[in-house]
Image (spheres, rainbow, N blue to C red):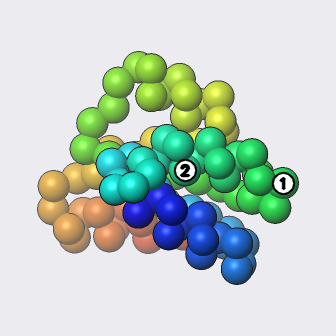
Amino acid sequence: NGLECLEILHRFTPDLIFLDINMPLMDGKECLIKIRNSPALNDVKVVMCSTSINTTDAQLFDSLNARYLTKPSAYKDFVDILRAHLP
């Protein structure tokens, strides 16, 4: 969930964050906004993940310097996409 994500991010700064848009307690959009408002995390690359997107969300992600990834239905395909984004 988004609250747990932020709690973990207070302990260390990753090189890349993958956030699902639909998370319990705090969704990915709100979590992304909080990440971008944090000086320690503002420059971390963020990729938003979901099975669908609307233009309002796409504009928000773009304005917050986050990329968007449409999750494929097959787990193996998702793992391949994640590997392509990792250093």
Residue furthest bottom in the image: 11
Q: Where is residue 47 in the image (x, y as percent from the top left)?
A: 51, 51
Proximity of marks 2 and 1: CB atoms separated by less than 8 Å: no
Q: Is residue 71 visible to the viewer in this orientation of the structure?
A: yes
Q: Position of residue 34 (x, y in %)?
A: 65, 48
Which circle marks residue 72 in the picture? none
Q: Which residue position is annotated with label 2?
A: 31
Judge left or right: residue 31 versus residue 11: left
Q: Residue at x 65, y 36 (%)?
A: 64
Q: Earlier in the sequence, mark 2 or mark 1?
A: 2
Q: Which residue is drawn at 15% across and 62% down?
A: 74
Instruction: Specify few, some or many for label 1: CA neighbours under 10 Å numbering under 14, 14-19, or 20 or more.
Output: few
Residue furthest front in the image: 25
Amino acid tagged 2: Cys
Helix, strand, or loop for circle 2? helix
Judge left or right: residue 5 versus residue 49: right
Q: Is residue 20 visible to the viewer in this orientation of the structure?
A: no
Which one is in front, 11 or 46? 11
Which circle marks residue 39 in the picture? 1
Quadrant position of residue 9:
bottom right
Q: State how far apart marks 2 and 1 are (Cα).
A: 14 Å
Q: Residue at x 59, y 64 (%)?
A: 6
Q: Position of residue 76 (x, y in %)?
A: 22, 70
Amino acid tagged 1: Pro
Q: Where is residue 20 in the image (x, y as percent from the top left)?
A: 39, 54
The quadrant the C terminus occupies is bottom right
Q: In this view, does 51 lie above or below 38?
A: above
Instruction: Specify few, some or many for label 2: CA neighbours under 10 Å numbering under 14, 14-19, or 20 or more.
Output: many
**Number of marks in the rendered image:** 2
